[in-house]
Image (cartoon, grey):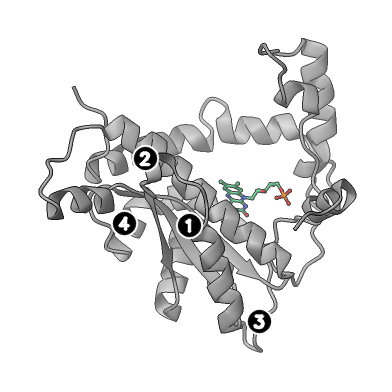
Amino acid sequence: MSLTPDEVRAFYDAHRTVRQYVTHEGGTPIPLPDEHLDVILHAAQRAPTDATAQLYSLVRITRPDLRARIAELTTNAHIASASEAFVVCADVQRVRRVLAVTGHEPGHWPAIAVHFGIGDAVMAGTNLLTAAEMLGYQGCWIGGVMNGLDGIISALNLPEGVLPFAALTIGRPAEHAPYRPRVPRPLVIHTDSYHAGTDDEIRDAVEVMNPIAARGRQPGDWARLMNAYFGAGGSMSKREPALRAALERQALAPTD
Ligand SMILES: Cc1cc2nc3c(=O)[nH]c(=O)nc-3n(C[C@H](O)[C@H](O)[C@H](O)COP(=O)(O)O)c2cc1C
């Protein structure tokens, strides 16, 4: 099967992160038809995988009380109302079991585990979301798992070697999400040699990105948003100790 370049562009231009979904009256989720659920899970598992190992797991969240708990822990309410909600995890415990069950001794490679585990998890989740979009759904990745990592690990009984990367919600859109800009291509796609960009190119990129930070009638200020996340005292600095603690707890912290 092949599509034209215009069709491929139109498909990716139709992508929107959507956080409000069509629900039953009262806000309870409308489940995906079985064959839709089956094919998006199939798509997830068809993702390419490093070393053939499939170092990821998806935890599908179905119980309403668990949906509510994960929504609270991630501070993303739509986990409770989406048609489907998953926690996408790096997972090296399964390959360790493959080794153990077949009589082999596992090596020591915690940094490699994080590198390949997150890579595989992202590829599987991306396939799942893209397949859902092909079926007319939209979704939202939720890095908000970082707001409640310890609680999520406990709530989902994640063993050592399994680390949540993000959650992912899927459903029929109940909001008109805007087309959100991206940083201009020359700063992102490099040819042969890395190009860090001049200060003017960076300032232009900030201008291009400003609308993504607009809230209601307030004009967007992307640099301010980036500062709130990545600046001194921002939310990422606050997440850092929790992620380090989770890496320790899940036996994924690099040690000598
Ligand atoms: C790994 C990842 C984590 C994200 N975390 C959240 C989140 O916690 N909450 C949220 O509402 N959106 C989250 N998003 C969605 C982004 O805000 C969204 O993709 C971005 O604004 C671009 O918008 P677009 O996908 O509509 O083009 C996340 C996206 C990714 C890829």
Q: Is mark 1 within 8 Å of ligand 1?
A: yes
Amino acid carrying label 3: it is Thr
Task: Select label 1 or label 4 by which is in front.
Answer: 4
Is the residue under label 3 in contact with that under label 2 (CB below 8 Å)?
A: no
Residue 208 picture location, percent across and down: 84, 32
Q: Which residue is mark 1?
A: 74
Q: Residues within 10 Å of mark 3 (few under 14, many from 20)?
A: some
**Tag 4 or tag 1, which sits nearer the N-term?**
1
**Tag 3 or tag 1, which sits nearer the N-term?**
3
Question: Residue at 41% across / 78% down in the picture?
Answer: 65
Q: Which mark is residue 153?
A: 4
What distance separates the C-alpha of mark 4 from that of mark 3?
28 Å
Q: Look at the numbered disc 2 and give the secondary structure of its residue.
A: helix
Q: Which mark is residue 243?
A: 2
Q: Residues within 10 Å of mark 1 (few under 14, many from 20)?
A: many
Q: Is mark 2 within 8 Å of ligand 1?
A: no
**Tag 2 or tag 1, which sits nearer the N-term?**
1
Amino acid carrying label 4: it is Ile
Q: Which residue is mark 3?
A: 23
**Tag 3 or tag 4, which sits nearer the N-term?**
3
Is the residue under label 3 in contact with that under label 4 (CB below 8 Å)?
A: no
Is the residue under label 4 in contact with that under label 2 (CB below 8 Å)?
A: no
Between 175 and 49, the residue placed more toward the observer is: 49
Quadrant of the rendered structure where residue 60 is?
bottom left
